[in-house]
Amino acid sequence: MNIGIDKMGFYTPHLVLDMTDLAHARGDDPDKYHIGIGQSEMAVVPPTQDVVTMAANAANQIIDESDKQAIDLILFATESGVDNSKSGAVYVQRLLGLTEHTRAIEVKQACYSATAALQLAKDYIAAHPQRKALVLASDVARYGLHTPGEITQGAGAVAMVVSANPQILAISDQSTYLTQDVMDFWRPIYATEARVDGHFSANIYVDFFTNVWTRFKKTYGVDVTDFDAMLFHLPFSKMGLKALRTVLPADETVASRLTDNFESARLWNRHVGNLYTGSLYLSLLSLLANGTLADNAQLGLFSYGSGAEGEFYTATVQPNYRNGFDQVKIESLLNARQQVSVGEYEQLFSDQLPTDGSTKKLDIAADPAHFVLAGIDNEQRQYQAH
Ligand code: CAA
């Protein structure tokens, strides 16, 4: 029985910053951002969006009435959670009208946790083939104004329905993973911005890829030539290219197939920035939408989360994969975004919700998303559809 991703939805806020504008404001050469980092635009988050609303907006694109009854496991992967106790998955269950007879939890391990959630969901469906699981990957990547990490920020959410006989991707049982206690990137409980040892983190990323990939090849007797595309966690799109270059074979046909597919796989990420847990899965969507894949194309996926965990696994693209996501809707979402100036971005970055328990009402009229955060009342977040 094939098990894997049946449907995928994507959401990013309606505000966006052009990286050329940011480069000029910071006194940098725009080529550093566009070529050296590989980012053209960066999502900017209005106060009316957070990881819960973004996840609900992404899932709302794909959930139908039959899913609402069949989903009895909601796994919410994030490292930007809005509450130290309550799971974002519980809010999403209510906002989407999913059955109450569901397990709904949040999972955390930096950018890796959506992959852990996906693999756990796959095992769950293997034990309960009639049911479905909803995996949500939602994050706001925040490093701080004028920091080296600033140009690798972003935000958004990917929602995935996991089921038997999936439309998009059958996930194989073959995978290798690695966990080591490394301080390359972290966020103390009191901080809203990540702490990062930037160049060290990029080296650790490649080390983890090399480790799990070498182990994968040895364990399953495969080589890079067996793959149609290699996908990577993309904290910034050049990062995946750096990892890919370590395995490109001498065979030019294979190398250009892998690099061409990588270009398709980083297209949408270039225009959104880092979405931590969702980055690998936005890259997957970008490849499915913008690439030309043969029937039953073989994908290798590398997931990385600082701290650190890495996993390499494989999956097979299903014949009717284009039915599992709405390309037109995603493109209109990206194209309809409103550009903000660097000054507006800086203001939005600094406009944080109160942390002293006071009440705040937000102006939701300007936000075109279906689900929004309307404010904080009695220390409770007020989520609603509008
Ligand atoms: N034209 C073209 N390229 C240029 C250029 C120009 N004018 N100027 C510079 N470049 C290139 C540089 O040569 C460099 O390329 P290589 O990496 O291929 O050598 C690239 O642009 C970046 O330049 P710097 O290394 O000088 O940039 P920096 O020191 O300002 O910061 C960074 C880069 C370390 C990635 C920083 O943005 C950062 O700390 N980001 C956050 C950390 C991160 O994303 N780490 C990734 C691994 S961890 C992870 O994956 C988990 C996660 O999601 C966070």
Image (spheres, helix red, strand yellow):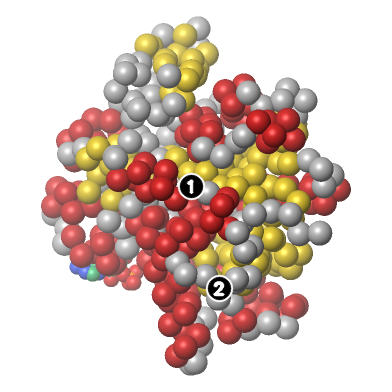
| Location of residue 45 (image quadrant) | top left
Q: What residue is disc 2 on?
A: 294
Q: Quadrant of the N terminus?
A: bottom right
Identify the residue at horizontal 50%, vertical 55% (top origin).
285
Q: Residues within 10 Å of mark 1 (few under 14, many from 20)?
A: some
In this view, which residue lies farthest toward the right?
127
Identify the residue at horizontal 32%, vertical 63% (top origin).
38
Q: What residue is disc 1 on?
A: 326
Disc tally is 2
* Vertical order, 169 against 46 (above or below): below
| Location of residue 239 (image quadrant) | bottom left
Provide residue 101's location: percent of width, then percent of height.
Answer: 77, 25
Q: Nearer the viewer, residue 275 or 82?
A: 275
Q: Which mark is residue 99?
A: none
**Visible in this render: residue 356?**
no
Q: Earlier in the sequence, mark 2 or mark 1?
A: 2
* Vertical order, 252 against 84 (above or below): below
Q: Nearer the viewer, residue 107 or 119?
A: 119
Spatial CA span between label 2 and label 1 = 20 Å
Provide residue 136's location: percent of width, then percent of height.
Answer: 59, 41
Provide residue 151's location: percent of width, then percent of height.
Answer: 30, 52
Q: Nearer the viewer, residue 189 or 219?
A: 219
Q: Secondary structure at mark 1?
A: loop
Task: Name the side, left or right, on which 135 lies relative to 344.
Answer: right
Disc 2 vs disc 1: Cβ atoms closer than 8 Å?
no
* Vertical order, 298 against 19 (above or below): below
Provide residue 178's location: percent of width, then percent of height.
Answer: 67, 63
User: Looking at numbered disc 1 in the image, what kind of residue is underneath it?
Assistant: Asp
Identify the residue at horizontal 50%, vertical 61% (top origin).
288
* Vertical order, 322 against 328 (above or below): below
User: Looking at numbered disc 2 in the image, what kind of residue is underneath it?
Assistant: Ala
Q: Quadrant of the C terminus?
A: top left
